[in-house]
């Protein structure tokens, strides 16, 4: 599968989702602002009615009382102007501005909210006369609310930027670990059969009469080299699964490692308690590699005279393989970490074997791998679960 096939669609989808979220946030905030402005307008209308009923002309002294006592609790700036929009009284203006500044403030208010006319009804003619206007601006709460979505968007953008930067650093670090680990794993996989072949050649030079026996062993090591090549090539290509005998694969892996335990400097008891004739849908080359990696990890974890046992059981849907060792154990906090690229509890480890194993089991075969049990100093049980064929 092409990993970049849907990259463009994913980016476009994320952009659209982000645009919709920002538009929704701004729209919702603007809706609340409009509601608050409407509430303020109703208050100003009420004040306009009070003023119109209180005064009989624009110079009436009662205006001082209205602005100082009735409107003193208003939370937004307000200006009372004459019919020709000349400011007369003001409230909640930051400072006492000169008339020119007050006119500019009044114009700004009018852009925010439409001024309300003060209608005075002549008691004689019953004619409605406009005696002035009330101009009002946005309260401090509305101004803060208007800036809120931008602050939220900025905070979220900063969080995403920091998260993306951190994720990129982690991802690049994992890539470096994978490349270094892959190089070491390749050298490790090739090292054993190549060293063996070089040893057989030296043996042939000194004891040519043992040629027939040595050729048989050389053939095994050449097959091992071919197997290593198959393993790495199948990790980078689409893998076909077929029904295989899992019992035979486990037996071959255990037999191969048991023969090479002396060359590893270990005197470990390696036992196989797997039932015969257990079949699964899998790729035999990769499954054997995965099981071998787990057993090798157990061998590295045990001291001399340790034990490693491979068990298997079947349930209704799955085949469960357990590799039990008597090694030094794994700390509980690292039960998941051991399957991450680059993580290793060994001094000379490169943290790729179990990571490759996890990918083989989970991504290629649809199974699972986990630390079923482990105690410091009392060994570890790694459990691999694979689906049975239908």
Image (cartoon, rainbow, N blue to C red):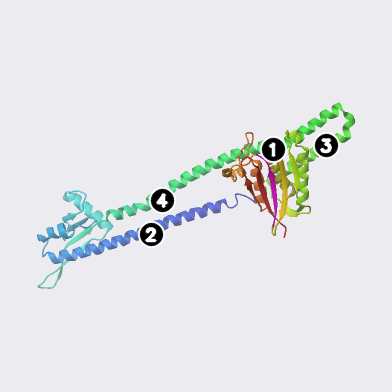
Q: Look at mark 4 in the image and give the residue it sits on.
A: 153
**Image side of residue 114 versus residue 171, left or right:** left
Magenta stretch holds residue 129: no
Mark sitting earlier along the chain (3/1):
1
Tell me where residue 164 appears, x and y as whole percent.
Answer: 50, 45
Q: Nearer the viewer, mark 3 or mark 1?
A: 3
Tell me where residue 374 appears, x and y as whole percent.
Answer: 63, 45
Mark sitting earlier along the chain (3/4):
4
Q: Look at mark 2 in the image and give the residue it sits on.
A: 28
Q: Which mark is residue 172?
A: none
Mark 4, Cα crowd under 10 Å, few <14 / some 14-19 / many 20+, is some
- Principal secondary structure, stretch drawn in magenta: strand
Q: Nearer the viewer, mark 3 or mark 2?
A: 3
Q: Circle 2 — which element?
A: helix
For the residues labelled 4 and 1, the Cα–Cα distance comes to 48 Å
Magenta stretch holds residue 322: yes
Q: Look at mark 1 in the image and give the residue it sits on.
A: 186
Magenta extent: 318-327
In this orientation, which residue lies closer to the viewer: 190 or 375? 375
Mark 3, Cα crowd under 10 Å, few <14 / some 14-19 / many 20+, is some
Looking at the image, which residue is at 88% across and 29% down? 208
Quarter of the view holding residue 135:
bottom left
Q: Nearer the viewer, mark 3 or mark 4?
A: 3
For the residues labelled 3 and 4, the Cα–Cα distance comes to 68 Å
């Amino acid at each position: 599968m092409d990993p970049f096939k849907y990259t463009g669609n994913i980016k476009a989808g994320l952009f659209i989702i982000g645009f919709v979220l920002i538009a929704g946030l701004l729209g919702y905030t603007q809706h609340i602002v409009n509601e608050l402005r409407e509430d303020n307008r109703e208050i100003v209308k009420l004040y306009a009615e009070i003023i119109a009923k209180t005064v009989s002309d624009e110079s009436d002294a009662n205006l001082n009382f209205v602005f100082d006592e009735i409107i003193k609790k208003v939370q937004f700036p307000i200006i009372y102007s004459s019919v020709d929009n000349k400011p007369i009284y003001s409230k909640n203006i930051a400072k006492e501005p000169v008339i020119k500044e007050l006119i500019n403030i009044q114009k700004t208010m009018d852009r925010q909210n439409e001024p309300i006319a003060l209608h005075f009804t002549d008691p004689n003619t019953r004619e409605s006369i406009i005696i002035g206007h009330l101009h009002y601006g946005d309260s401090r709460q509305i101004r803060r609310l208007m800036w809120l979505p931008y602050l939220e968007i900025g905070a979220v953008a900063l969080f995403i930027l920091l998260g993306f930067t951190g994720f990129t650093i982690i991802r690049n670090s994992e890539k470096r670990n994978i490349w270094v680990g892959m190089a070491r794993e390749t050298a490790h996989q090739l090292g054993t059969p190549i060293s063996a072949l070089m040893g057989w050649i030296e043996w042939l030079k000194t004891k040519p009469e043992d040629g027939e026996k040595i050729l048989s062993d050389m053939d095994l090591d050449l097959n091992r080299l071919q197997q290593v090549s198959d393993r790495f090539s199948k990790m980078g290509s689409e893998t076909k699964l077929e029904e295989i005998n899992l019992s035979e694969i486990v037996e071959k892996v255990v037999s191969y490692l048991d023969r090479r335990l002396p060359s590893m400097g270990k005197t470990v008891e390696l036992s196989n308690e797997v039932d015969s004739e257990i079949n699964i849908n899998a790729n035999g080359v990769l499954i054997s590699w995965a099981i071998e990696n787990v057993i090798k990890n157990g061998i590295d974890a045990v001291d001399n005279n340790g034990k490693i046992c491979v068990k298997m059981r079947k349930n209704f849907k799955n085949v469960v393989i357990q590799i039990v060792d008597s090694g030094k154990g794994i700390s509980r906090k690292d039960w998941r970490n051991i399957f991450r690229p680059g993580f290793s509890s060994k001094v000379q480890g490169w943290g790729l074997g179990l990571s490759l194993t996890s990918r083989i089991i989970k991504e290629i075969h649809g199974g699972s791998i986990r630390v079923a049990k482990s105690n410091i100093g009392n060994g570890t049980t790694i459990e691999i679960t694979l689906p049975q064929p239908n």
